[in-house]
Amino acid sequence: MPIAATVNGKAVTLHADEDTPLLWVLREELGLTGTKFGCGIAACGACSVHIDGEVARSCSVPVGSVAGKAITTIEALGQPGAPHPLQAAWIAHQVPQCGYCQSGQLMAAAALLKQNPHPDDAAIDAAMTNICRCGTYVRIRAAIHAVAGASA
């Protein structure tokens, strides 16, 4: 059954069983491979995207539930030559090590700053529940604070 949605600002018709995880439709049907598969049970956050502006773990979201909604993936967070302020801060603070979780981390951080432009450490820790096996949490927090401070 076709499912109409908006992905990264473009109207799309998705062709998948309604219970197919959104993650697989993004990666396989639309070729948006920046959203990563990590655990498949919504625990790690590597697959984080925004659905109608809210962060969601796409591995556990049935594509049928996104009909009529706006989905944003890491590919639309910034543009080549014009990175999102978080992407620039990630580079400045040397956040990525292996990099696998970083697209999900960035999507979670962007949702946090949209909701709370000046989070304290407790708010960052509460919102940033994505897992980073390299342990770059201190750098992630510093990058978020840098962007929050720049918007003050």
Image (cartoon, helix red, strand yellow):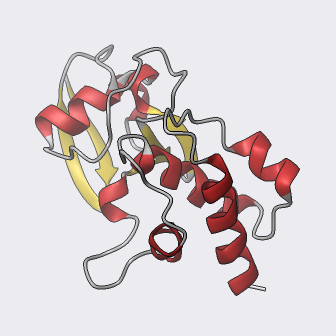
Q: Where is residue 46, by image quadrant?
A: top left
In depth, the one of 132 and 108 nearer the eye is: 132
Q: Is residue 70 visible?
A: no
Which residue is drawn at the image coordinates 68% and 53% (left, top)?
Answer: 138
Which residue is drawn at the image coordinates 37% and 35% (left, top)?
Answer: 67
x then y, percent, for residue 37: 32, 28
Q: Is residue 72 above or below residue 18?
A: below
Relative to 21, 65 lies left or right? right
In depth, the one of 120 and 12 nearer the eye is: 120
Q: How many marks?
A: 0
**The N terminus: image quadrant:** top left
Which residue is drawn at the image coordinates 43% and 49% (left, top)?
Answer: 102
x then y, percent, for residue 52: 52, 50
Relative to 4, 2 lies left or right? left
Relative to 146, 95 lies left or right? left
Q: Is residue 48 visible?
A: yes
Q: Is residue 126 above or below residue 53?
A: above
Which residue is drawn at the image coordinates 32% and 42% (left, top)?
Answer: 35
In depth, the one of 100 and 74 nearer the eye is: 100
Relative to 92, 124 lies left or right? right
x then y, percent, for residue 99: 37, 48
**The C terminus: image quadrant:** bottom right
